């Protein structure tokens, strides 16, 4: 294994990964292979458990994107077969197994999302997406044990970190076998599609090297030969130490706008801590080194302007959801957090759709502000609504509410803009 920063990694791809702080390790022969000038095909696997990828998948997505930009051929392997098994790496429990119909729907959705980042148009460097169920589905147990299992010892498999961390808590034979299935994937891709490189997070290194071992043994290569290669990325962790990809509430931030709206997606990146934004600019944008360093310098002088966060949020939202959706998210964000009241129905409609506003029954307005807001779900109870109103913390359609019995008048007979404290704003729309 060649550690980050080792001499001889003169490839443009490896140099870029290094300055971006992404490169963890490579196998010894990769720098020379990349430096040969011959295009290389490389793959990364994606879990098809859901019908959408999430921001944690941006690490492998940008891995393929940068490989393609540097002249490589990216292959996205969606685990329709291994998704029925589960990978123990980085997990504390076994995942649910998926039926074929669900997997097929998930694969179609994932392909559409990958097309936002990778170029699938015909050509020598065209991206390709394959489903490992296509070759694992017809694999017999006898053939698998005879042709793959015989090349691995139990001590070799037990020594892998992904297995060690699960032994005490329990690891099924199903998940224990995942390493061999992923190794089979790499060997199949190497043999049938000429894929020489597997990429993945540092926690996937054991699975990557298992594939390299299987290729070496089944290709007739000698002990010192390196017919295939591996590349690992640093693990990107949140301040709490968990793998990157969750919101502050612990929920996934999805690439599907039906699961996470472009507004919420934009806000996720806009709210990044000053300490992290430089890292995320390097990992999740194609901005150059000088531009990123200039943004960091500007943020150090004027942190309240959040220039780096705005550049990050705009860039990744536009790439994920398109320029129009990014522009709308920025417009809605500026309106949502402006100091003045909003009475434009078009702006209110956009904010309602972007933020998931509340519906209200006009008949409940007569109950008074406290009861109405509790009925609409803006407050969990009438008591809390009354206390907040008494403290001067509620404004409805630009009017500071001091009386719990206040009856609000909707804008244009349809809209309510409710501000609670300095940071919370809720948009209500008449039901029906």
Image (cartoon, helix red, strand yellow):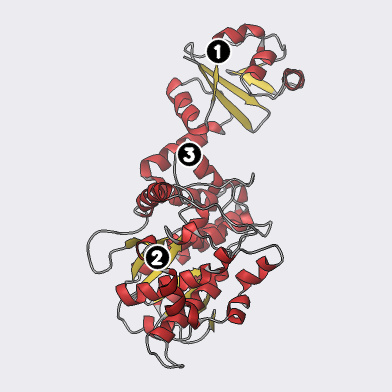
Give the answer, above or below, for where 297 lies relative to 232. above
What is the spatial separation of the Cα atoms under label 3 and label 1, in whole angstroms?
A: 25 Å
Q: Residue at x 49, y 74 (%)?
A: 208
Q: Dot 2: what SS?
A: helix
Q: How many marks?
A: 3
Name the N-terminal-most of marks 3 and 1: 3
Q: Residue at x 48, y 39 (%)?
A: 261
Circle 2 or circle 1, nearest the eye: 2
**Residue 25 % position (x, y):** 53, 77
Residue that extends furthest to the front in the rendered view of this protein: 142
Decide: few, some or many residues near mark 1? Use Cα within 10 Å; few <14, some 14-19, many ≥20.
few
Tell me the quarter of the picture where residue 420 sits.
Answer: top right
Give the answer, above or below, for where 12 lies relative to 255. below
Give the answer, above or below, for where 297 lies relative to 15. above
Name the N-terminal-most of marks 2 and 3: 2
- In the image: residue 385, left or right of residue 272: right
Circle 2 or circle 3, nearest the eye: 2
What is the spatial separation of the Cα atoms under label 2 and label 3, in whole angstroms?
A: 36 Å
Toward the viewer: 189 or 17? Answer: 189
Name the N-terminal-most of marks 2 and 1: 2
- Residues at badges 2 and 1 in contact (C-beta under 8 Å)? no
**Residue 50 % position (x, y):** 48, 48
Decide: few, some or many residues near mark 3? Use Cα within 10 Å; few <14, some 14-19, many ≥20.
many
Tell me the quarter of the picture where residue 36 sits.
Answer: bottom left
**Residue 428 % position (x, y):** 54, 21
Residue 361: mark: 1
Residue 261: mark: 3
Q: Residue at x 47, y 69 (%)?
A: 181
What is the spatial separation of the Cα atoms under label 2 and label 1, in whole angstroms?
A: 54 Å
């Amino acid at each position: 294994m060649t550690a980050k920063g080792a001499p001889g990694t003169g490839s443009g791809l490896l140099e870029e990964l290094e300055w971006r702080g992404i490169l963890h390790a490579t196998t010894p022969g990769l720098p020379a292979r990349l430096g040969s000038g011959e295009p290389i095909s490389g793959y990364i696997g994606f879990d098809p458990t859901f019908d959408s990828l999430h921001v944690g998948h941006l690490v492998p997505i940008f891995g393929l994107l940068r490989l393609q930009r540097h002249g490589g051929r990216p292959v996205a392997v969606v685990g329709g077969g291994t998704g029925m098994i589960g990978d123990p790496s980085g997990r504390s429990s076994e995942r649910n197994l998926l039926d074929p119909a669900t997997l097929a729907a998930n694969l179609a959705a994932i392909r559409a999302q990958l097309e936002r980042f990778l170029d699938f148009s015909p050509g020598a460097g065209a991206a390709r997406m394959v489903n490992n169920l296509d070759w694992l589905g017809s694999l017999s147990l006898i053939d698998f044990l005879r042709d793959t299992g015989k090349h691995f010892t139990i001590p070799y498999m037990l020594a892998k970190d992904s297995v060690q961390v699960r032994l005490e808590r329990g690891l099924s034979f199903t998940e224990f076998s995942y390493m061999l299935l992923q190794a089979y994937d790499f060997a199949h891709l190497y043999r049938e599609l000429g894929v020489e490189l597997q990429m993945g997070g540092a926690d996937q290194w054991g699975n990557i090297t298992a594939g390299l071992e299987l290729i070496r043994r089944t290709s007739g290569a000698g002990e010192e030969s390196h017919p295939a290669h591996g590349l690992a990325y640093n693990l990107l962790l949140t301040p709490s130490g968990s793998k990157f990809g969750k919101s502050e509430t612990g929920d996934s931030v999805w690439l599907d706008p039906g699961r996470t709206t472009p507004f919420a997606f934009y806000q996720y990146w806009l709210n990044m801590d000053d300490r992290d934004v430089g890292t995320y600019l390097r990992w999740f944008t194609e901005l150059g080194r000088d531009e990123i360093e200039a943004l960091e310098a500007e943020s150090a002088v004027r942190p309240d302007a959040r220039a780096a966060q705005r550049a990050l949020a705009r860039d990744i939202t536009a790439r994920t959801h398109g320029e129009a959706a990014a522009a709308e998210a920025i417009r809605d964000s500026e309106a949502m957090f402006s100091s003045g009241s909003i009475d434009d129905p078009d702006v209110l409609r956009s904010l309602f759709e972007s933020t998931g506003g509340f519906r209200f029954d006009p008949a409940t307005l007569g109950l008074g502000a406290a009861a109405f807001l509790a009925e609409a779900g803006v407050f969990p109870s009438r008591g809390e609504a009354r206390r907040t109103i008494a403290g001067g913390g509620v404004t409805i359609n630009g009017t500071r509410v001091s009386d719990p019995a206040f009856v609000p008048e909707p804008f244009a007979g349809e809209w309510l803009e409710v501000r609670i404290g300095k940071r919370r704003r809720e948009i209500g729309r008449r039901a029906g």
